[in-house]
Image (cartoon, helix red, strand yellow):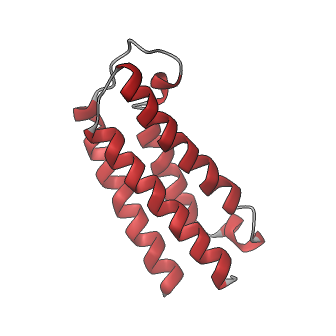
Amino acid sequence: MDSTNTQLLIDAAKSIIDNAVALQKGEPTGKKGMENYSHFSASVHSFQVYTFMDPEFESFQPLKDFQQAVAKFDEHYSKLRYEINVKADQKASKPDLEALQEQFEKLKQAFNG
């Protein structure tokens, strides 16, 4: 795998983590909740774009595991995309945030190993 592409992907994954933490700790509803979700969603989109830069990424299991963890965490907040008065259950999302952070660490190790 190309080291430049790998670094871009790791940086994009770190952005997902940073925005997931902000989402989990931020306002669970309203305009601010929607803004936080928008930032998270944008970082996920950027990450997804970077996954197409290297054909080897498609079959890289740690990357697939990270993507699954992102999707699981996103389930708690995706309703904020369209509804301003809906409240996200941040307490319920905490284990999935921790799993996402764990998968990020595994992804970094796999790329650096």
Q: How many marks?
A: 0
User: Picture coordinates of residue 11 (x, y %)?
Assistant: 52, 67
Is 18 displayed left or right of 8 in the figure?
Answer: left
Judge from the rendering whether residue 47 lies leftward or rightward of residue 28; answer left or right. Answer: right
Q: Residue at x 33, y 19 (%)?
A: 87
Q: Residue at x 48, y 43 (%)?
A: 40
- What residue is at 70 percent from the left and 55 percent from the top? 49
Query: Where in the figure is residue 100, as x and y percent of width and height?
Result: 39, 54
Give coordinates of residue 109: x percent, y percent. Answer: 43, 79
Q: Is residue 107 above or below residue 69?
A: below
* Residue 9 drawn above or below residue 101: below
| Residue 30 visible in this rendered orientation of the protein | yes
Residue 62 visible within the image: no
> Residue at 54% across / 40% down in the picture?
41
Is the residue 83 above or below the residue 51 in the image? above
Q: Position of residue 33 (x, y in %)?
A: 38, 28
- Image check: 54 left or right of 6? right
**The N terminus lies in quadrant:** bottom right
Above/below status of 2 relative to 11:
below
Residue lying farthest to the top in this orientation: 85
Q: Residue furthest bottom?
A: 113
